[in-house]
Image (cartoon, rainbow, N blue to C red):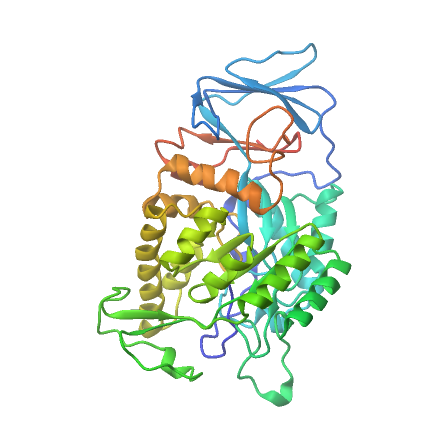
Amino acid sequence: MRKISLRFRFNSLLSVAFLPPAFFSTVFSATAQEPSTAPIVLHASRLLEVDTGNMLQPGEILVEGERIKAVGTTVDHPQGAKVIDLGDTTLLPGLIDAHVHLFLHPGAEDLQTVEESVPWRTILAEQAAKADLMAGFTAERDMGTEGAGSADTAVRNAINQGLIPGPRLRVSGNAIDILGGHEDANRFNPAQHVLSNADYANTAAEIVSVMREQHKEGSDFAKVYETGPDRMVPAGSPPCMGDPICAQIETSEEPGDPEFWEFHTPYQYTEEQLKAAVAEAARLDTNVGVHCQGEPGARFAAEAGVASIDHATQLSEATMKMMKQKHIPAVPTFTIFEYFADHVPTPAAAAREHAILDYKIHEFRRQVAAGVPMAVGSDVGPFPHGTQARELELMVKYGMTPLAVLQADYLNGAQILTWQNEIGELKPGYDADIIAVPGNPLDDISVVEHVSFVMKGGVVVRR
Ligand SMILES: [Zn+2]
């Protein structure tokens, strides 16, 4: 989620100033990483069986090559195996972030996508991928390069070839957006011809054409902007009719209280247009992710059969029921909303962001109660890479159990990334993407923000 705005221009600081301490303290050999030829046995005080919720005590995993060979309270220790005792920690699968932006860095409303070259942004994306991996995220869906086109394929391919460290990636290239839509460079001097951060498509045929172009350039899936811009308005307000000033709220009422405020977000594509996108994605054996804040766009997206509904601030009863029936996860992305609310330049802007966050929390509780499947996606990029495990803590804070959040992250995350039965569980045959966290995440979910060990594909990348 990103909005170009001159009004809220921040200082354009380079992201290196925001990289987390773990980035600097972790020694990583960036040369090609091959899995150990000798088997590895990981031992820790606990191990979470994701699907059952059972906590094995102790827990052991036998890793051979890139994959998990055996899991239990004890496993075979083959001759020559390297045993790594991780002490009083819990073994978990590598975390999955279903909504990231490797090509964005903090400074949410600045002009980074206008001012920075694609080569420079690609170098920063490489650093972002490393920071995310070191924080325990071994698989991510990158929801749009925001104007860097298919440069994400270079990052993905370099990671896959072991040239640079980073998570397994599903990438989309640019997102797809309408002319004058959510991610277009609106209200700049037209004579300057400032480019959109997305690829234009205004009809079903154009959506298919853009998807084919992105596929040609190496995309794994399509990201579509389905709603926006968003606004909180006093209940009963007339529509803004495109007036940007109208979207600013006063600070006098209770932010977020649905009694006082209404959330409005226009849809961008019709149900039929989204169905064309989903059909084309199915032809390419992939799926469609949507930025979708509210109704009626969310209903159109659920009817069309998208992979997930991201942000999902406002969902009707009918949409929630459909998402449950079709098992389409909502991806709340609380962390970005919290970050925006805490990092705005004026009290009026802060009131607006807090109003949306409060409304979002209110709606999330309804969604959890209605049994809407959830996945974990942080929208990291506008806030520092490597810090996004906070998303799991916020989902617990606002109403889910730690186990439910972990299952949402792993099982629904693997579904969205179309890596079911390959990642997200500690089972024989799965990729050896394994992390260790101090303590017990079922007692205190915040331990996932302090990952102490990371293995990806059988290679120890952080210890
Ligand atoms: Zn996003």
Residue shown at 42%/84% (left/top)? 241
Q: For this view, does 267 lie left or right of residue 349?
A: right
Camera-side residue of 422 and 245: 422
Q: For this view, does 41 lie left or right of residue 108?
A: right
Vertical position of residue 95 compared to residue 331: above or below: above
Q: Position of residue 135 (x, y in %)?
A: 53, 42
- Quadrant in the rendering for residue 351: bottom left
Q: For this view, does 53 lie left or right of residue 124?
A: left
Picture mark count: 0
Q: Position of residue 234 (x, y in %)?
A: 27, 75
Vertical position of residue 389 compared to residue 45: above or below: below
Q: In the image as oriented, which residue stretches furthest toward the top?
A: 79
Q: Is residue 7 visible?
A: yes
Quadrant where the C terminus is found in the figure: top right
Q: Position of residue 87 (x, y in %)?
A: 48, 21
Camera-side residue of 155 and 224: 224
Camera-side residue of 308 and 403: 308
Q: Is residue 379 visible?
A: no
Q: In the image as oriented, which residue stretches furthest toward the bottom?
A: 191
Residue shown at 72%/43% (left/top)? 160
